[in-house]
Amino acid sequence: MSHGHRAAQRQEIKMKSVTFKNKTWDVAANQHVPAGFDESKTYPAIVVAHPISSCKEQTAAIYASKLAEFGYVCLAFDASTQGASGGPGQYLEDPATRVEDFRCAADYLVTLPYVDENRIGVLGICGGGAYAVNAAMTERRFKAVGTVVAANYGRICREGDLSPDAAIKALEGISAQRTAEARGAEAALTTYIPQSKAQLESYGITDVDVIEAVDYYTTQRGQKPGSPNKLNVVSTGAAFTWDAFHLAEKLLTQPLQIIVGDGHAGGFGSYRDGFELLNKAASTKKSIFVVTGATHYDLYDKPDCVDQAVAKLMAFYGENL
């Protein structure tokens, strides 16, 4: 396909806002459809999940729109309680709810007459990738699983500041906050990352993932209203005992494509998580693709890195959906 044709096609990709239910609340999503979309035809579909602290308009939208160019109906959604989605509270990062969102997304897709229910895949970026893996173990309507810099949120919480009792101290603080809220206190909110480059520098943080997170989320590069850098403190407690890859050696049997970067591995650990997942998954068709020199956040939006990832994902979904 010529570059000019691709550029013209990209402009024709259509997107519309939709909602689907998780229990009693609405989950907000953007549905990206191919050029020339015709509701009387049937299409393969891909559920696209955003990173932790992100929203559907950021890197998830980049991947969803690019995959739509190649003939997929792509559903990028805001996690429950985040972005424009409803839910029991605000800014929760609760693994069980996050995983249920995927099942509800599949419920929604199978009601659409133009989606082939036997050709639904899933893709997740960063924490969304680990959630996608976990969901796919029990959500068998997902026929192919793709991840980009997937990071296991439970592992990140447990590692903390790497001191032996850091996790226990954190959990004791969360328990004390639950007591306060049970007695009427306001919900405690914290931030995922420093709120500006100046604040980052004042903290003396040198980890490349945090540095690049601040650049992505707090500047024009990736900043969006649906991603306000807010986290409900109490909601993090459940993640400490949660492992995104638990039972992958038994239950993750779908074709699996993992994408990581090998440039300056940072504290989020997506490079090593990618290889752990590769080694652990029961999938007979599984592969890892390393984007040479790419950092975690390069694979969010850096065009040459994203294009390499998308090319690999297109070949993967083309073979397996």
Image (cartoon, rainbow, N blue to C red):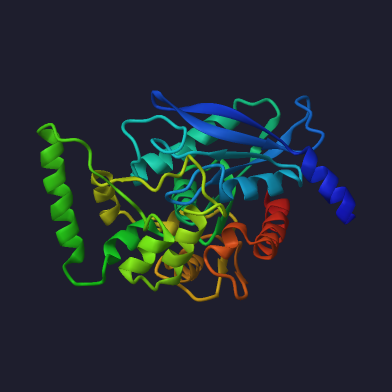
- Where does residue 162 sit, x and y in percent of width and height? 26, 71
- Where does residue 152 sit, x and y in percent of width and height? 40, 59
Answer left or right for 292 relative to 33.
Answer: left
> Which is nearer the eye, 40 or 300?
300
- Where does residue 318 sit, x and y in percent of width and height? 73, 52
Answer left or right for 76 relative to 99.
Answer: right
Residue at x-position 56% and y-position 59%: 148
Examine the rendering and report whether any part of residue 305 can be seen: yes
The image quarter in which residue 92 lies = top left
Examine the rendering and report whether any part of residue 257 can be seen: no
Residue at x-position 47% and y-position 33%: 84
> Which is nearer the eye, 275 or 202?
202
Answer left or right for 198 relative to 177.
Answer: right
Residue at x-position 59% and y-position 35%: 30
- Where does residue 219 sit, x and y in percent of width and height? 51, 54
Asked if 38 appears above or below 285 in the picture, the reply is above
The image quarter in which residue 240 lies = bottom left
> Which is nearer the eye, 302 or 259?
302
Label tally: 0
